[in-house]
Amino acid sequence: MAEPAQTLADLGEWELIRRLGAFAPPGQFADDAALLPGVGEAGQQGALVVNTDVLVEGLHFSDATTGPGDVGWRAAAANLSDLAAMGCTEVVGLTVGLVAPASTTWAWVEGVYGGLREALDTYGGVLLGGDCSGGAQRLLAITAIGRLGGGATATGQPGAITSCGPIRRSDGLAGDWLLGTGPHGLSRLGLALLQGELPGGSPAYGAPSQGATPTAAGSPAAPLAALLDPNLRARAITAHRRPRPRFDAVRALIASRPARLGWRVGGCDSSDGLAAAAAAIAASSRCGARLDRASLPLDAAMAALPRAEAWCLGGGEDFELVLALQPAWAEALIAALPGTTRIGELVAGEAGALGWSDGAAWSPGDGGSAAASGYSHFN
């Protein structure tokens, strides 16, 4: 009797990507973006990098939480973040494939492209073209092209120019420090506020629900959303709607490299979650990873929330960089880039295995059951 045909649900996103990699040159699918074959040497500064991402209505955006301009910005920023995660400091441009039902208003399309243009005006590059098609569901397919970072002054050698290369998930080594370039969990908190997930919150802005019973601040019955610092609420919603690709972090990385060290940087962005990023770097580098629970990169104002640690580890869509660096370089980057912290280290051991720096084992409950694998399509 014939075995039933495997479906995408059976495979999951990561196994699908692994299998698709067989149709490309070895290693081409291993990172967030890909160096264009034949365009400069793999480590040559200025080499072109290309990335493609698809955003689907109901999965990546919705009218309930994201206006058209924010949809466009997020679509651009997600792709530009992948360029930064490969070591780009320059954006060449992007193409846009738009699929939408015929009933879609021009105002929505105009808003989306306005948001795309805002992101390009902010980070560089131009709209290179694209395609449009009718379909049952709104969808944006973005291809972004960037250029690896140019020379920069090396630490300890004023006026000297240092070469740089790509950032690869597979370039970490045991003993490297793991760094995060900014706080994690804010975007997930923003989504919770926009969707009214927090007790006492209503959709759109996380404001207290009408008719909520007034209680003393800090009492167990106080609506959680109502007790949030308004500045934290604003930061979280902005983090979700208007994420920042960290090209500034790549420039600081290049500039802070100690002169005696060659270029070797493991890393990726944290769009699928902090724990998933650490696990991906460790797996590709054939190491384990140990995270320091006391040093998780949480915004101080959200640290007391019940799900703060889970959202920090597995919330996703923070679009910070997670980097594996030699300790001397890591220390230099921490000093040069405010908000950058050491979150753990790579260790010899099972490839991709996560644990805690105090020796505690990683458990399914750490950051949620899917924290280590991150979000996966088709499951």
Image (spheres, rainbow, N blue to C red):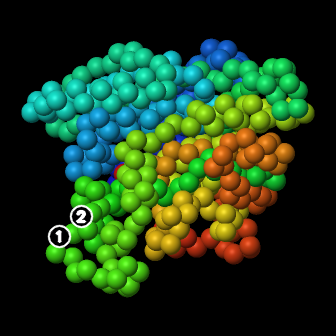
Nearest the eye: 180 or 30? 180
- SS at mark 2 in the image: loop
Name the quarter where the C terminus is drawn: bottom left
Q: Amino acid at mark 2?
A: Ser
What residue sits 64% from the left and 18% below the top? 47
Name the quarter where the N terminus is drawn: bottom left
What residue sits 43% from the left and 24% below the top? 120
Residue ranking furthest to the bottom: 220
Q: Earlier in the sequence, mark 1 or mark 2?
A: 2
Q: Is residue 283 visible?
A: no
The image quadrant of residue 34 is top right
Rendering coords of residue 181 (x, y %) = 62, 47
The residue under label 2 is 202
Q: Nearer the viewer, mark 1 or mark 2?
A: 1
What residue sits 79% from the left and 43% below the top? 332
The residue under label 1 is 210
What residue sits 16% from the left and 29% below the top? 107
